Amino acid sequence: MLSAAQQEAGISKDSGTDRTSRVLGGIAIAGCVISVVLDFIGTGISDRVGMIQDTISDLAASRTENTAADELADIGIYAFVLSVIATTYGLLRWRIDRLDWKIGSWLLVIVAICVVLIAGYEAYTTGEGPVIHYRLVYVLGVAFPLTVLLTAGQFWEISKRLGIALYTGGALWAVLGPLFFFVPTDYDGAYERMLAGLMLAWFITMGVMIWRDPDVVEQVSEDQRGHA
């Protein structure tokens, strides 16, 4: 049930459910934390993969090796996928009537699909047929910074400092992402984890904002708020 204050504010019932917001925000935050922790543990116990030279995909389970470290990496990656999905649904529930917001929110679906395919298809494929890993990385490299930049405008309306931070982070990732392909292979892992850290920081921030819903929703102006 909505409170009288929420009804007077015109908040959509789908945007102001405390329990759902807490669950989605918690999943978004926990998924990111779990992925980081398992990456550290996985590389720590692996005898073939290091954090500096080897990428996160290198640690994931493959056709030939199925060690505990590999499985931990897979679990961490899919925990991140759950974080992406929770964030997507959590932000869409705000029902913001801005084109940039809607496009940015739905781009998260593409981000999730890319992460799933990179983790699963490339890890368990037989190696025959087209190699789509780099194509997925290219799509991810475009979809993620666009998501950050397109949704930042709404957060600017809520908090100028947060908006500046998001615009800066999105632009930074857009510039640093393509440079990954020019980094010496000895530092692939370190550079990829730096980019992943920036991405996780955004998802954790979104998780916190979703967790605070409907407090955040109440700061959305009437003309920007959609209605069921």
Image: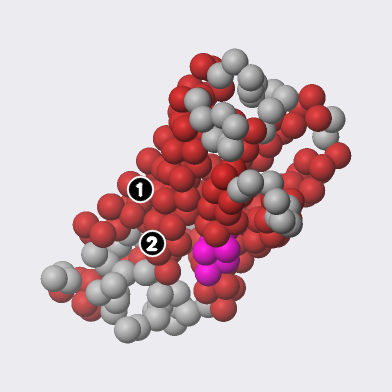
Amino acid on which the number 2 mark rests in the picture: Gly
Query: Does residue 22 appear in the picture of this structure?
Result: yes
Quadrant the N terminus occupies: bottom left
- Decide: is 63 above or below 207: above
Q: How many marks?
A: 2
Magenta stretch bounds: 106-111
Residue on which disc 1 sits: 27
Residue tagged 2: 90
Identify the amino acid type marked 1: Ile
> Residue at the location (53% across, 69% down)?
106
Is label 1 in a helix, a strand or a loop? helix
Of the two numbered discs 1 and 2 on the same chain, state the one appearing first in sequence.
1
Judged left or right of residue 147, residue 185 is: right
Residue in the image at 21% along x and 57% along y: 19
Q: Nearer the viewer, residue 198 or 226?
A: 198
Between the C-alphas of marks 1 and 2, the distance is: 10 Å
On screen, residue 192 above or below 37: below
49 to 12, vertically: above or below: above
Crowding around mark 2 (Cα neighbors within 10 Å: few <14, some 14 to 19, many 20+) is many
Which of discs 1 and 2 lies nearer the camera? The answer is 1
Secondary structure mostly seen in the magenta stretch:
helix
Query: What percent of the width, then of the height, locates residue 34?
Result: 42, 35
